[in-house]
Image (tube, rainbow, N blue to C red):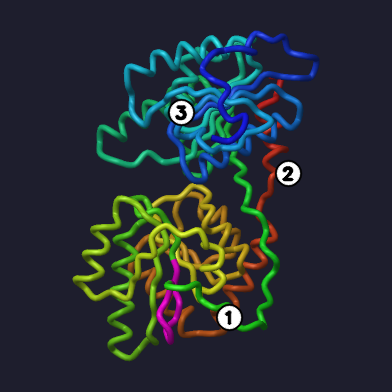
């Protein structure tokens, strides 16, 4: 665990009086990984660096190795599903919330528990800001629970920050008084690529020789549309066999619960897809790829697309959630359908001019990506507001 990450479960320091201009802010999260976890840390660091007393309340699994300094952190277990521990979490957030200027909760579970802890909107109540990071996906019961949590948040939050336009519209429809699109900073900029330079060498084990290089970087989970990816690969493989498309190899970097089933299908259908597993060289893979493909069924503001824009690679992505907002014209957007993905990919693999235009579009869009200064500006208005 990073130095200063967890200060323990006692509430030492929470009774300090607030200095003039120095506010106490709680950053609250339930289970989180990837971009959500990174965003939590960004918010905490930015506000603490402004001189405010920031306390991160999140599960140990989220805080482990998470650098939030100069903010403090305390373990608060909020699981992915309702449990008896929610009562304790609400009680703790109620105690801490009384002494805070604002509570900024991340996700439906943390947002709903904070809403229960702080009560209804009223003059003088601690300010509640909730960032919605994900669309509730699942069966009828899961959807009903998710809608209930969204409704609770909409009725009690002073401000809802949504990572995608569809989440923002849902919050407005449920009666949230104020909704904004959340700012999700792009990864650190890479040195600009030279379009006239030779293609980078492929990282070892990523693609075979003498084939076009297709890449997807994603967790192997239902939201990422793995069956769509394999369907598109099957369509393109047929085109190769018919002599209408050059040979290609599709590398999939990432791991997750869908790996075994995907591997079985790849083997059974002889698909030109290789499962690379978890990789730490995503940027290098993107730089060496001819096309990066996202086949997700839903996304907020995908960091993978931001990273691909930074490398200036041609991109095909499903037009879902906040992908269009993130891509800013730098990706070929298609419906989440296998044929649409395959057709767009085939065009980029066979038409050098189309691929060159897509690369240029990516480089231009990368210049428009938000940074940490943009997030800081939003946080100062959203979390520190005095209304």
Residue at horizontal 28 percent and vertical 89 percent from the top: 242
Q: Is residue 326 magenta?
A: no
The answer to whether 150 is drawn above or below residue 344 in the figure is above
Mark 1 or mark 3: which comes first in sequence?
3
Which residue lies under the disc numbered 3? 59
- State whether residue 337 is above or below residue 137: below
Mark 2 vs 1, N-terminal side = 1
As drawn, is 345 to the left or to the right of 161? left
The main secondary structure of the magenta stretch is loop
* Residue 177 placement, left or right of 264: right
In terms of secondary structure, where does tag 2 sit?
helix
Q: Out of 140 and 220, give the one closest to the viewer.
A: 220
Q: Please, what secondary structure does the residue beneath circle 1 have?
A: loop
Verify CB contact (< 8 Å) between mark 2 and mark 1. Answer: no
Residue bearing the label numbered 1: 199
Which residue was labeled with disc 2? 373
Where are the magenta residues, as a range? Answer: 206-215
The residue shown at (70%, 25%) is: 384
Q: Nearer the viewer, mark 3 or mark 2?
A: 3
User: Looking at the image, can residue 297 be seen?
Assistant: yes
Q: Nearer the viewer, residue 196 or 264?
A: 264
Q: Are marks 1 and 3 in contact (CB under 8 Å)?
A: no
Spatial CA span between label 1 and label 3: 43 Å
Q: Earlier in the sequence, mark 3 or mark 2?
A: 3
Foreground label between 2 and 1:
1
Local crowd size for mark 3, using a 10 Å CA cut-off: few (<14), some (14–19), many (≥20): some
Q: Is 276 displayed left or right of 120 in the figure?
A: left
* Coordinates of residue 271 in the picture (x, y in percent): 28, 74
Coordinates of residue 17 in the picture (x, y in percent): 72, 9
Screen quadrant of the N terminus: top right
The residue lying at 54 percent from left, 13 percent from top is 10
Q: Position of residue 73 (x, y in %)?
A: 58, 26
């Amino acid at each position: 665990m990073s130095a200063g990450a967890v200060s323990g479960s006692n509430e030492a320091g929470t009774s300090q009086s607030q200095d003039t201009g120095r506010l106490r802010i709680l950053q609250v999260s339930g289970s989180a990984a990837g971009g959500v976890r990174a965003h939590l840390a960004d918010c905490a660091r930015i506000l603490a660096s402004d001189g405010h007393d920031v306390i991160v309340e999140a599960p140990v699994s989220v805080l482990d190795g998470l650098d939030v300094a100069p903010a403090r952190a305390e373990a608060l277990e909020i699981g992915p599903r309702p449990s008896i521990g929610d009562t304790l979490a609400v009680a703790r957030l109620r105690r801490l919330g009384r002494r805070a200027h604002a509570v900024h909760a991340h996700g439906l579970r943390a947002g709903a528990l904070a809403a229960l802890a702080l009560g209804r909107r009223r003059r003088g109540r601690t300010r509640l800001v909730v960032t919605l990071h994900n669309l509730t996906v699942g069966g009828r019961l899961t959807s009903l629970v998710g809608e209930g949590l969204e409704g609770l948040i909409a009725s009690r939050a002073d401000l809802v920050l949504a990572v995608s336009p569809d989440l923002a519209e849902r919050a407005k429809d449920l009666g949230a008084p104020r909704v904004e699109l959340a700012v999700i900073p792009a990864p650190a900029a890479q040195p600009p690529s030279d379009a006239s330079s030779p293609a980078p060498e492929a990282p070892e084990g990523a693609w075979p020789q003498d084939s076009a290089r297709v890449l997807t970087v994603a967790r192997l989970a239902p939201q990422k549309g793995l069956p769509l990816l394999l369907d598109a690969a099957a369509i393109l493989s047929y085109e190769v066999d018919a002599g209408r498309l050059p040979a290609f190899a599709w590398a999939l970097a990432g791991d997750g619960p869908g790996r075994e089933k995907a591997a079985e299908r790849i083997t059974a259908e002889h698909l030109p897809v290789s499962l690379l597993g978890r990789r730490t060289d995503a940027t290098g893979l993107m730089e060496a790829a001819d096309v990066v493909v996202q086949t997700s069924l839903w996304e907020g503001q995908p960091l993978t697309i931001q990273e691909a824009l930074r490398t200036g690679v041609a991109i095909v992505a499903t037009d879902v959630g906040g992908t269009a907002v993130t891509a800013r014209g730098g990706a070929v957007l298609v419906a989440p359908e296998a044929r649409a993905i395959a057709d767009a990919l085939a065009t980029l693999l066979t038409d050098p001019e189309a691929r060159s235009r897509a690369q240029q579009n990516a480089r231009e869009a990368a210049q428009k990506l938000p940074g940490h200064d943009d997030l800081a500006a939003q946080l100062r208005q959203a979390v520190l507001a005095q209304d």
